[in-house]
Amino acid sequence: MKAISGTNLEQAKAHNRRVVIEAIRTNGPLSRAAIARLTALTAQTVSNIVEELEGSQLLKPDSPQKLARGQPITPYSINPDGAYSIGLELERDHAAGVLTDLSGTIRARVTRPIDPPTPEQAIPILAAISAELQTAFPFDRNRLLGVGIAMPGRYAAEGITSLTPIALPGWQHYEVGPALERLVGVPVLVENDATAAAIGERLYGVARGLSSFVYLFLGGGIGAGMFLDGHLYRGSRANAGEIGHIVVEPDGLPCVCGKRGCLDRYVSLGAAYEHLKIDDPGAYAVEALDAMIEEAGPALDGWLDAAAEPMRRTIDFLELAFDPQTIVLGGPMPAGLLARLAARMEPLYPPVDPDEERRIARIMIAATGKDTSILGAAALPVFSETNPQFAVLQKPIA
Ligand SMILES: [Zn+2]
């Protein structure tokens, strides 16, 4: 693969650091030789990175293992207390945050129900959640790598910190990252909720270890997060995967985007609520809505029948366009309904190679449930290759 821009030494180091941390987080303790094998990095590069990460206390050596022959080998593990990060999630009806350690374990959690917020309301709430998380669990504040925040797309502008979500009313031209950064004092990274969920599922869920998959985020709308050939695919304005606005029904139902017949209007929690004649979902708590969906039973059959064919075509298109190992269904939609939808989509259109013996199912249900995007958001500062906080950790500790 060729990149358009060159890679300088610092960028390469940051990339390799991410790859090594991810390999150990996903696989458990690894020796330098095992890291080199898994990452295709040279032994020398692995040694340098491991030494650097050990120096900044992000990795710790376990006790050496004696082999029948040759030198004993030392496996390295993640030092959970080596770094912390905060993941925030802002949705129409709630704001939430988690504090995770470097191993990805949640150490504190805060949730606040809110009405659809303006930026002026939301930013202080998000800053307060971030402050509360930092007092809820004792840790070295110098080791806070940053804050990641997952928000619904679509986005305007370029650059991951200056994204302005245009799906929430009142947020047009509002730069979330810099505004929140001024209050929290650590780097803030903003990500589309579907993409954050794909990151979360890759670190914690059924997509662990997969290099190419599409995560379909089914919530108020439908969007896709994509890992392709081991890389997150964002697009030029972080809008890659905004498939909810593909027209599936010419002259169909009107959509907020201005078009008619968008996929969002047929395959989403919003569409399911509409089918159940829940006119104002914003008036209910999330748990109450989930209960209505779970209890609806056959009342949702009509919706599932209408949603199945647009979903089948969407799956067919995604498989043909991106050749993923699997497609994961997840997001805020209750797991029971996701499973019913997956069953109703069968039989799928024939795959590219019908004779292939598949080791991985074409469709999987996400394992991480409602935490997926917030965990993905918390992972953003850890896996960012431009996060300046890593330099802070390099400084010798007095
Ligand atoms: Zn639309």
Image (tube, grey):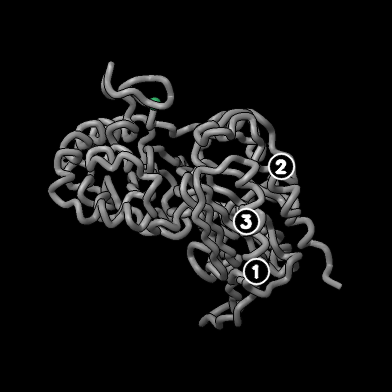
Mark 2 and mark 3 residues within 8 Å of each other at the beta carbon: no
Residue 178's disc is 2
- Bin the neighbour count of mark 3 within 10 Å (Cα to Cα): few under 14, some 14-19, many 20 and up: many
Residue 32 shows in the view? no
Viewer-side residue, 68 vs 292: 292
Residue in view at x 72 percent, y 65 percent? 143
Q: Earlier in the sequence, mark 3 or mark 1?
A: 1
Indicate left or right for 294 with 232 as reference.
Answer: left
Residues 209 and 397: in front is 397
User: Which one is in front in this view, the residue at disc 2 or the one at disc 3?
Assistant: 2
Q: Amino acid at mark 2?
A: Pro
Residue closest to the far top:
251
User: How crowded is the residue under tag 1: few (<14 C-alpha within 10 Å), some, or many (20+)?
Assistant: many
Secondary-structure class at tag 1: strand
Q: Residue placed farthest to the right in the image?
A: 398
- Alpha-carbon span between mark 2 and mark 1: 30 Å
Left or right of 68 in this view: 281: left
Which residue is identified by label 1? 59
Q: Is residue 180 visible?
A: yes
Give residue 77's position: percent from left, percent from top: 58, 71
Residue designated by label 3: 382
CA–CA distance in space, label 3 to label 1: 13 Å
Q: CA distance from mark 2 to mark 3?
A: 19 Å
Location of residue 354 with respect to 128 vertically, above or below: above
The kind of residue on which mark 3 rests is: Val
